[in-house]
């Protein structure tokens, strides 16, 4: 028995009716290490974690945890053995305090009554070890996402967990919060707690992990020491081929004096005095910390939320959008950052989803013509090479990347002049990410204006020709060409003085 | 060729409407073997009449559920409009003018519900629960609690709509079928009604698709109120009495019918055809119980059992996706049903 190993997964398989989700997968986690788990969407990461977490059983193979054979029958089994699972979508009770969430199911009591004094003391003690700066009495609904994550981690720590599983923990965190989370993980590591870190973001995997295991199509590809490899090695293992250039070429033919959109003094809830232009042939990126007001500007620009003041010019003509529909009619569309909650009609068919923004195009005298609906959808499915089982299947069957492409198709059907994409590739795997970036570039070359809002700096830097950086509701500055760097963006985004960032225009 | 037939058969048999229809056939066959009188004209007429008014409410509820809402005031709006029409007729107002007045009152109810739900943003459950009391209360106030007999005040031509028949088929039933057909066609094929499904499926996404969500909601609640008004007026014509107790609890039967017919409680899916099947099933089972001399007190019990059973079977069959339902297996249809594209 190898006592250096905390978790040893051998030849694990999982079959669902009709599919084989895992095929002889291996995974070794050493004591006190941070272990990365990478793979494209559908590679089997979640399935593996769900088996380790006791959500469902494996159909083959074996696991050893902490020197003992390990076969959790339910999540509680797994938790009792010392495994804590922090899901990507946090599962806390928002109406209860942080302390009640941390000690849920095991509240200290005295003679049948909850001992609140002890509860809050204990919870504060745990939170303090994690360097949290909020009281355990705070309601979870009043905490930010990163603070809520700390509550989950505090729960795990207080359960004396030996292995902490973090599933895409940074997907809704700002860069600052991510740094803080990593400090916490490093602290836990010093105490001998292992962390299994699932992420799409190479940069983070390389920053925090000691080793990384890569899965592809439900099979084990390899386990590598981070110190010996590069980003490209991991991506190649994930995708099974060289991706070549990660981002498409930047634009070569920006028409400097041709403004698709010109915005002046735009003010509204959460932003003020925003002015920018979008030139023909360029992709304009909006960077900034989460909460800097980027999405709010875009929503105000499109008439989704009301604006207090400001002028919007489209192709030189002044516009006034009372509601979103007006903007759509003029050719501006907005793709939401939150696909699931405000982008997709999940249980409806792919065709109905694609047709939803432009029913006029598929109907005659107010009646929907099914043939038109299907042929229009078919057109965009082909053009964007979306992989689907059939147009009449619910869109929920598709992967994140294909869903996003459907949404792009939906908006292309309105013949837009400007496409605004908020977090265009959130939750989308590497291969599909690239396709979407290429697609944006192609659209841009066809003369469609493209604005992207993104919290992923590599994406902004790799895709945008020009970057507008926002800080606390105001424009901190623009960066162009060589000056688009992580350092400059972060300086502007964190509100450092303008002169500190070189090359601000 | 054979594949095409199989594929077509698959789509037909994977639909809830077909399942419910088959159960109806089963109930009819079994009952008429035990009690041949079940099939005679009188009984058929009485089933048709009982389906008609409750069926109108069920169509209204289907729309509300598809929209992701609910409408609890259908029965009491019918009572209120029935009483208003009857009261005005008693005062010597021309019956058609009285009808227009009660349609106007129905319109006000619909606009109120729609406005409170969309513009103010209150939950539909609360708004329509309040309206259920408001409208019922109004009916009691107008009648001071006791039924108004309008015998002799209604013109024959007015009463014809609820009591007449064409080739032996009750006009009331024909009205119901026509309205069902219109609702079916609109909800399946019209641009306007498609927006209902979008809003019910995901309100945020609908708003971000440029759909005027508020207008859709107001439109639906107004339509439901108008359908309820029609039910109220037809009830007056049928019974010759304006009673404030009319259609008490009708909303629960209507919800059952819609849900049995496959309309989702969470919005975004369902349709009128299933609902019509659902209301037929409930009423036919009621009639079968009467025919087989089961005490009427069993009716509600059985209706509850059918609802719970239908939803349970549906839930179990969908939980393991791709597996055909128990009913399908019972009828030997499971071999036809494979993967399930949305219909």
Image (cartoon, rainbow, N blue to C red):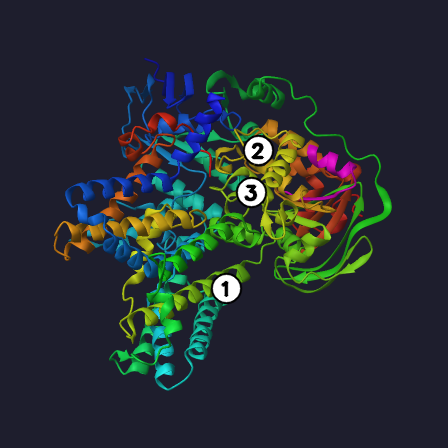
Viewer-proximal residue among A282 and B341: B341
Local secondary structure at mark 3: helix
Q: Which residue is mark 2?
A: A401
10 Å crowding of disc 1: few (<14), some (14-19), many (20+): many
Residue drawn at (15%, 43%), measured in percent from left and top? B34
10 Å crowding of disc 3: few (<14), some (14-19), many (20+): many
Q: Is residue B311 magenta?
A: no
- The answer to whether residue A65 is seen in the rendering is yes
Q: Which residue is mark 3?
A: A353
Q: Are marks 3 and 1 on the same chain?
A: no
Q: Chain of mark 1?
A: B
Q: Which residue is at the far front?
A: B167
Question: What is the x, y in percent for residue A167?
Answer: 45, 34
Q: Looking at the image, do the residues carrying marks 3 and 1 touch, with CB atoms under 8 Å apart?
A: no
Viewer-proximal residue among B127 and A295: B127
B283 relative position to A18: left or right:
left
């Amino acid at each position: 028995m190898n006592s250096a190993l905390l978790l040893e997964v051998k030849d694990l398989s999982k079959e669902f009716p009709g599919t084989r989700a895992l095929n002889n997968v291996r995974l070794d986690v050493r004591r006190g290490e941070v272990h990365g788990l990478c793979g494209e969407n559908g590679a089997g990461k979640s399935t593996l974690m769900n088996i380790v977490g006791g959500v469902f059983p494996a159909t083959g193979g074996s696991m050893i945890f902490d020197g003992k054979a390990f076969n959790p029958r339910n999540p509680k089994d797994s938790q009792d053995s010392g495994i804590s699972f922090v899901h990507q979508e946090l599962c806390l009770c928002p109406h209860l305090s942080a302390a009640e969430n941390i000690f849920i199911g095991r509240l200290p009591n005295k003679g049948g009554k909850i001992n609140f004094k002890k509860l809050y003391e204990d919870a504060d003690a745990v939170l303090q070890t994690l360097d949290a700066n909020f009281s355990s009495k705070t309601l979870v609904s009043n905490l930010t996402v990163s603070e809520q994550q700390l509550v989950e981690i505090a729960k795990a720590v207080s359960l004396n967990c030996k292995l902490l599983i973090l599933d895409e923990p940074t997907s809704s965190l700002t860069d600052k919060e991510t740094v803080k989370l990593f400090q916490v993980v490093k602290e836990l590591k010093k105490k001998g707690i292992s962390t299994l870190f699932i992420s799409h973001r190479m940069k983070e995997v390389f920053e925090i992990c000691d080793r990384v295991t890569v899965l592809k199509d439900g099979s084990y590809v390899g386990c590598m020491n981070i110190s010996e490899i590069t980003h490209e090695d991991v991506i190649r293992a994930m995708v099974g081929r060289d991706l070549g250039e990660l981002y498409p070429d930047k634009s070569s033919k920006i028409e400097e004096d041709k403004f698709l959109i010109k915005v002046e003094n735009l003010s509204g809830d959460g932003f003020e005095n925003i002015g920018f232009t979008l030139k023909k042939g360029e992709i304009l990126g909006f960077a900034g910390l989460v909460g800097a007001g980027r999405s709010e500007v875009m929503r105000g620009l499109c008439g989704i939320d009301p604006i207090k003041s400001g002028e919007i010019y489209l192709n030189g003509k002044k516009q006034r959008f009372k509601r979103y529909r007006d903007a759509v009619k003029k050719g501006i569309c907005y793709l939401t950052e939150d696909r699931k909650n405000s982008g997709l009609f999940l249980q409806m068919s792919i065709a109905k989803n694609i047709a939803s923004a432009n029913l006029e195009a598929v109907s005659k005298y107010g009646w929907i013509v099914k043939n038109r609906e299907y042929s229009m959808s078919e057109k965009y499915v082909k053009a964007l090479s979306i992989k689907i089982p059939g147009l009449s299947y619910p869109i929920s069957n598709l992967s994140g990347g294909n869903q996003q492409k459907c949404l792009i198709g939906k908006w292309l059907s309105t013949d837009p002049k400007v496409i605004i994409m908020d977090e265009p590739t959130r939750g989308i795997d590497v291969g599909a990410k690239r396709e979407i970036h290429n697609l944006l570039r192609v659209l841009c070359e066809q003369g469609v204006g493209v604005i992207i809002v993104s919290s992923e700096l590599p994406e902004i830097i790799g895709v945008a020709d020009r970057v507008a950086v926002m800080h606390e509701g105001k424009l901190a500055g623009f960066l162009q060409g060589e000056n688009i760097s992580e350092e400059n963006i972060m300086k502007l985004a964190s509100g450092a003085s303008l002169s500190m960032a070189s090359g601000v225009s | 060729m054979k594949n095409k037939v199989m594929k077509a058969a698959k789509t037909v048999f994977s639909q809830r409407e077909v399942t419910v229809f088959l159960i109806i056939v089963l109930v009819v066959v079994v009952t008429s073997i035990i009690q041949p009188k079940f099939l005679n004209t009188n009984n058929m007429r009485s089933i048709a009449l009982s389906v008609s008014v409750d069926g109108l409410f069920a169509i209204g509820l289907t729309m509300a559920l598809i929209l992701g809402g609910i409408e609890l005031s259908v029965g009491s709006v019918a009572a209120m409009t029935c009483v208003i029409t009857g009261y005005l007729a008693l005062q010597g107002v021309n019956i058609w003018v009285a009808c227009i007045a009660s349609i106007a009152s129905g319109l006000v109810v619909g606009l109120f519900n729609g406005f409170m739900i969309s513009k103010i943003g209150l939950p539909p459950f609360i708004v329509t629960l309040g309206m259920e009391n408001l409208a019922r209360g109004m009916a009691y106030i107008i009648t001071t609690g006791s039924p108004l007999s309008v015998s002799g005040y209604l013109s024959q031509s007015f009463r014809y709509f609820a009591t007449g028949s064409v080739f032996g088929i009750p006009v009331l039933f024909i009205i119901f079928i026509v309205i069902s057909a219109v609702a079916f066609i609109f909800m399946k094929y019209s641009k306007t009604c498609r927006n209902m499904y979008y809003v019910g499926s995901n309100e945020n996404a609908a708003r971000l698709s440029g759909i005027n969500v508020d207008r859709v909601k107001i439109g639906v609640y107004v339509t439901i109120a108008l359908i309820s008004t029609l039910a109220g007026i037809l009830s007056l014509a049928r019974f010759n009495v304006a009673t404030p107790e009319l259609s008490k609890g009708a909303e629960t039967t209507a919800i059952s019918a819609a849900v049995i017919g496959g309309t989702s409680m969470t919005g975004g899916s369902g349709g009128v055809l299933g609902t019509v099947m659902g209301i037929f099933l409930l009423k036919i089972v009621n009639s079968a119980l009467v025919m087989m001399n089961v005490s009427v007190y069993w009716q509600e019990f059985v209706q509850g059992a059918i609802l719970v059973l239908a939803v349970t079977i549906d839930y179990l069959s969908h939980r393991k996706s791709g597996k055909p339902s128990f009913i399908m297996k019972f009828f030997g249809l499971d071999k036809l049903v494979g993967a399930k594209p949305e219909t």
